[in-house]
Image (tube, grey):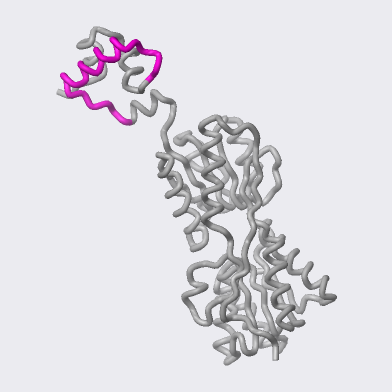
């Protein structure tokens, strides 16, 4: 028959509350009572139930991560880094993937199964913020769309990334520079386009073409294939993410147009394929490791009650020059 905490209480001659405090290392127990409980535990060979102990502490030692997709190697890298960083704090990660962009109340929030939440690229921040503040559940937003000063968040300076990518193409001598921007539902897409336009404006240039697309290889391919068919091809393309850049390269290669000899291409994110496919992609690297570590640091401070105020951290991207760009002839 399985030994219970009640058996330990009976054997030690103390209350269940006192036994629970000893098992949870409470400093409020007298030393002689602590020893009586430990002796009873040893004699009965009692193994505390892990779930019961976490409930007694009021902590699950689990942090939830809510994401909208798994089909992105950059987001996958962030998730991997968050998992590793949480483990170093003695916490585990549980993942919830929203079924679609309208899924504003996933099960992790409904059931309160976690000590805190990290929400990655949310579409409906205000709904999340309202619900989580009502439940008093610690949370951090990553790559959020709105600037909410009352909420801790981690963002990347996408404006600067778009500027650096475009300025680099201008320095290579390109003047016919196109931009395939991401969906304007994402703040990152808007900011990358702002940086693109700012760099052109400083050089007194106009954008050659700007078109919006979903972050996918297929849409990058379709857009550039259409430009080829319309005979209005730029000499350089700044793509809103690496997938769009991969699609653009596919369309150009299929048409016999050489990258970078005839068209230079810059992506954004530095996904693992950027250095695996040929030509190796010039891109703007987002600091995935730094994003993950900062998000975990912020959520742990909230969980542990050491966070005195909400913090918005803006991290800097880095232009990585590879083989998909060259100076114009």
- For image coordinates 68% across by 83% down, the residue present is 227
In this rendering, the answer to whether 255 lies above or below 214 is below
240 part of magenta stretch: no
**Quadrant of the rendering where the N terminus is positioned:** top left
Residue furthest top as drawn: 13
Q: Residue at x 61, y 85 (%)?
A: 260
Q: Nearer the viewer, residue 106 or 177?
A: 177
**Main secondary structure of the magenta stretch:** helix
Q: Along the line of sight, which residue is nearer the eye, 25 or 72?
A: 25
- The relative height of residue 76 versus residue 131 in the rendered view (above or below) is below
Residue closest to the far right? 204
Q: Nearer the viewer, residue 15 or 224?
A: 15
Residue 196 in percent (x, y) is at 74, 69
Does residue 177 lie above or below 119 as drawn?
below
Q: Give the total of numbered labels.
A: 0
Where residue 266 sits: x, y (%)?
Answer: 63, 75
Furthest residue to the front?
31
- Viewer-side residue, 5 vs 198: 198
Decide whether residue 37 is among the magenta residues: yes
Q: Residue at x 59, y 52 (%)?
A: 121
> Residue placed at 63% from the left, 47% from the top?
124
In the visual, does 54 lie left or right of 297?
A: left
* Quadrant location, the C terminus: bottom right
Q: At which x and y percent is residue 52?
A: 34, 26
Tell me the magenta residue range: 26-50
Task: Determine whether, in the image, residue 40 is placed left or right of residue 58.
Answer: left
Instruction: Quadrant for residue 309, please give it.
Output: top right
Residue 220 in percent (x, y) is at 60, 75
Where on the picture, by quarter, is residue 41? top left
């Amino acid at each position: 028959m399985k030994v219970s905490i009640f058996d330990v209480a009976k054997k030690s001659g103390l209350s269940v509350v006192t036994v629970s405090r000893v098992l949870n290392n409470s400093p409020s127990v007298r030393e002689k009572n602590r020893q009586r409980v430990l002796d009873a535990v040893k004699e009965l060979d009692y193994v505390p139930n892990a779930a019961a102990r976490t409930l007694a502490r009021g902590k699950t030692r689990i942090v939830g991560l809510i994401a909208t997709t798994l089909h992105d190697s950059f987001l996958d890298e962030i998730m991997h880094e968050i998992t590793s960083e949480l483990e170093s704090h003695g916490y585990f990660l549980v993942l919830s993937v929203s079924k679609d962009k309208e899924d504003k109340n996933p099960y992790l929030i409904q059931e309160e199964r976690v000590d805190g939440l990290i929400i990655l690229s949310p579409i409906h921040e205000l709904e999340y913020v309202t619900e989580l503040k009502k439940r008093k559940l610690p949370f951090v937003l990553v790559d959020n769309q709105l600037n909410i000063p009352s909420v801790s968040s981690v963002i990347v300076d996408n404006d600067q990334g778009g500027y650096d990518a475009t300025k680099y193409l201008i320095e290579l001598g390109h003047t016919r520079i196109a931009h395939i921007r991401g969906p304007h539902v994402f703040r990152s897409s808007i900011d990358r386009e702002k940086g693109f336009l700012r760099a052109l404006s400083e050089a007194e240039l106009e954008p050659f073409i700007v078109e919006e697309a979903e972050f996918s290889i297929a849409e990058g391919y379709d857009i550039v294939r259409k430009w080829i068919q319309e005979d209005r091809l730029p000499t350089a393309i700044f793509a809103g993410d690496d997938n769009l850049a991969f699609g653009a390269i596919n369309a150009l290669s299929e048409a016999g147009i050489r990258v970078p000899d005839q068209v230079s291409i810059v992506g954004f994110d530095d996904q693992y394929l950027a250095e695996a496919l040929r030509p190796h992609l010039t891109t703007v690297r987002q600091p995935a490791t730094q994003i993950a570590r900062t998000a975990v640091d912020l959520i742990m401070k909230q969980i542990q009650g050491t966070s005195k105020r909400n913090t918005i951290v803006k991290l800097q991207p880095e232009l990585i020059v590879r083989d998909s760009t060259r100076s114009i002839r």
